[in-house]
Image (tube, grey):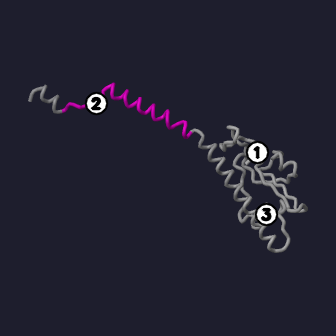
């Protein structure tokens, strides 16, 4: 067998430089489209967790109020009742996804109206059972921006949800 015949039997086909450049361009285009879609996943997850916690706690407080109304005295839970496991919430009080704290502090009606952030706590809770009807508010003790759009084209802060 001649040398030329041996080369054709054992010749290997490789990618050309043009083919490699074409693949790199396609990958760059895909990365340019995909990366912006996933870059804010952490923020969106934190916002979703906050909305879930707020919904769960507010639902539990409303359930407590409904049960108290059926018993004869319509009242929202006190801060101590709210934070005691098994009274209003069945599990331990949830962590604030923005600062990681599971503690709550008492607020006032003015705090509730302004959704004031204060102290090193995860949540703020306002309750006034002496008014008719009783009033309460529960909000996040953080003014970080969320991914929820407001009507003005900006975003809501965590304490505004």
Q: Is residue 120 above or below residue 1?
A: below
Residue in front for this viewpoint, 96 or 56: 56
Q: Which residues are the magenta region? A: 10-38
Disc assigned to residue 27: none
| Residue 69 lies in the magenta stretch | no
Query: From this viewpoint, which residue is outermost toward the right?
Result: 130
Residue 73's spot in the image, x, y percent? 85, 71
Residue 88's spot in the image, x, y percent? 76, 65
Q: Quadrant of residue 118?
A: top right
Tags 2 and 1 in contact by the CB under 8 Å rule? no
Give the labeled residue for mark 2: 14
Residue at mark 3 to residue at mark 1: CA–CA distance: 22 Å
Residue at mark 2 to residue at mark 1: CA–CA distance: 58 Å
Q: Is residue 52 above or below residue 62?
A: above
Q: Earlier in the sequence, mark 3 or mark 2?
A: 2
Give the labeled residue for mark 3: 84
Give the labeled residue for mark 1: 142
Q: Residue at x 60, y 40 (%)?
A: 40
Q: Earlier in the sequence, mark 3 or mark 1?
A: 3
Q: Earlier in the sequence, mark 2 or mark 1?
A: 2
Residue in front for this viewpoint, 108 or 150: 150
For mark 1, give the secondary structure: loop
Q: Residue at x 69, y 50 (%)?
A: 50
Within 10 Å of disc 2 (Cα), the crowding (few <14, some 14-19, many 20+) is few
Residue 63's spot in the image, x, y percent? 75, 66
Residue in front for this viewpoint, 94 or 49: 49
For mark 3, give the secondary structure: loop
| Residue 11 lies in the magenta stretch | yes
Within 10 Å of disc 1 (Cα), the crowding (few <14, some 14-19, many 20+) is many
């Amino acid at each position: 067998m001649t040398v030329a015949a041996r080369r054709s039997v054992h010749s290997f086909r490789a990618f050309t430089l043009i083919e490699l450049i074409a693949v790199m361009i396609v990958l760059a285009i895909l990365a340019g489209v995909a990366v912006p879609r996933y870059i804010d996943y952490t923020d969106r997850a934190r916002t979703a967790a906050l909305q879930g916690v707020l919904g769960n706690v507010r639902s539990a407080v409303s359930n407590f109020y409904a049960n108290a109304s059926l018993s004869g005295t319509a009242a929202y839970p006190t801060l101590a009742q709210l934070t005691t496991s098994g009274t209003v919430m069945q599990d331990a009080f949830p962590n604030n996804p923005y600062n990681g704290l599971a503690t709550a502090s008492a607020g006032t009606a003015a705090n509730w109206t302004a959704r004031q952030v204060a102290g090193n706590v995860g949540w703020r809770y306002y309750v006034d059972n002496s008014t008719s009807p009783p009033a309460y508010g529960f909000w996040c003790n953080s003014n970080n921006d969320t991914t929820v759009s407001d009507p003005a084209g900006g975003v809501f802060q965590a304490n505004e949800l």
